[in-house]
Image: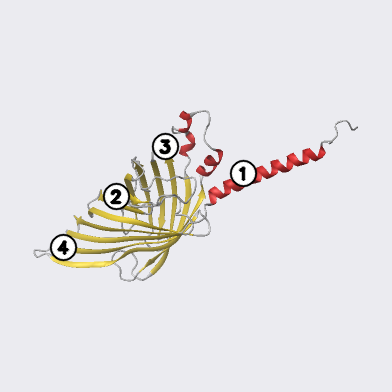
Amino acid sequence: MNVKLPFLFLLCFITYLNASAQYTEMINTNRPGGSQGAFSVGTNVLQVETGFSYGKEKHELLKTETNGLAIDYSIRYGFWKERLEVSLMGEYQSNKITDNRSAVSREYKLSNFKSNTLGAKYLIYDPYRKRDLEGPNLYSWKANNRTQWADLIPAISIYAGANFDFADNPFTPEVESTISPKLVLSTQNNFIGGWVFVTNIIVDRVTTDFPTYGYILTLTHATNRYFSVFLENQGLKSDFYSDQLLRGGAAALLNQNLQVDLSLTYSFKDTPSKFYGRVGMAYRFDMHNKDEYLEDKVNKELDEKEKKDKKQERQEELTPEDNGEQ
């Protein structure tokens, strides 16, 4: 199946970010979409994100019908630098399958981990940092409240991880237990009006016989401070499994550390077709005590003031105390 980037401008990052720093006042989560935003959770922040999915699959060629139950999870922790986070992400799937290829239907179950990935993400470019240091345009309200060409320049991060796949797993391509790499290039644009656009370019399991290449496009809109909606398109290309998925849903902030969400996933193909509903939540254990961005800004202003004071003192030393002296 050819993976084509359809012109769907779609979403993730359910919380609209104040991108002046990695750490945000409100919880910053990747849910309920499948993409990763460019920004981390912030130093000394431990965040747990999880969801429960239930749905149906139907495979036209194999003549099977499946009732599927899945649990996905993500544990994220920011340390050392605001730009860096480590994470453990995975999904456990349990399927009840009905095989209709014979006169008498046969039922059986399959259960295992679809993925377990340990990795790290680092923000390599943040265009919003420089803009916030420069400050707003004091002469034009209009210029500060409209989309500008600079808004098209995204924040960029790189994720590198290792997949841990178990032997005899029906949801992974390799027969034996394997460890394989996963790489994700993430970009994020924060637009005026509460719009956030995230893209992921994914290279997965490239050291195995079944490498996977894909993308995710995610568009989020924060209708207010506490409620967001999203739309997302994901494409996958592999000899083991290829698909085009469409997701949509909403999320609500119950407080600054807790978010709940609801979403639907639909597959465009029929080998198998998929339709899943998912409910989830994200909770943040906030131990953040240092905002690098704000402190950097304050330190810069103090350094400039100190240089200015020293220059003024030097000028006063060179000025004669008695103007009458020659």
Residue 292 position in % (x across, y down): 54, 52
Instruction: Please state which of the two labelled residues, at mark 1 or mark 2, is closer to the viewer.
Output: 1
Q: Which mark is residue 301?
A: 1
Viewer-closest of 6 and 85: 85
Viewer-proximal residue, 35 or 286? Answer: 286
Task: Answer with the quarter of the image where residue 89 lies.
Answer: bottom left
Residue 192 numbered tag: 3
Measured as percent of width and height from the top left, residue 140 is found at 50, 28
User: In this orientation, does residue 2 appear?
Assistant: no
How far apart are the alpha carbons under marks 2 and 3?
Answer: 28 Å
**How much space separates mark 1 and mark 2, taking CA atoms?**
48 Å
| Disc assigned to residue 245 | 2
Residue under pointer 4: 98
* Residues under numbered marks 2 and 4 in contact, where contact means CB atoms less than 8 Å apart: no
Rendered residue at 21%/56% (across/down)? 55
Label 3: state its secondary structure. loop
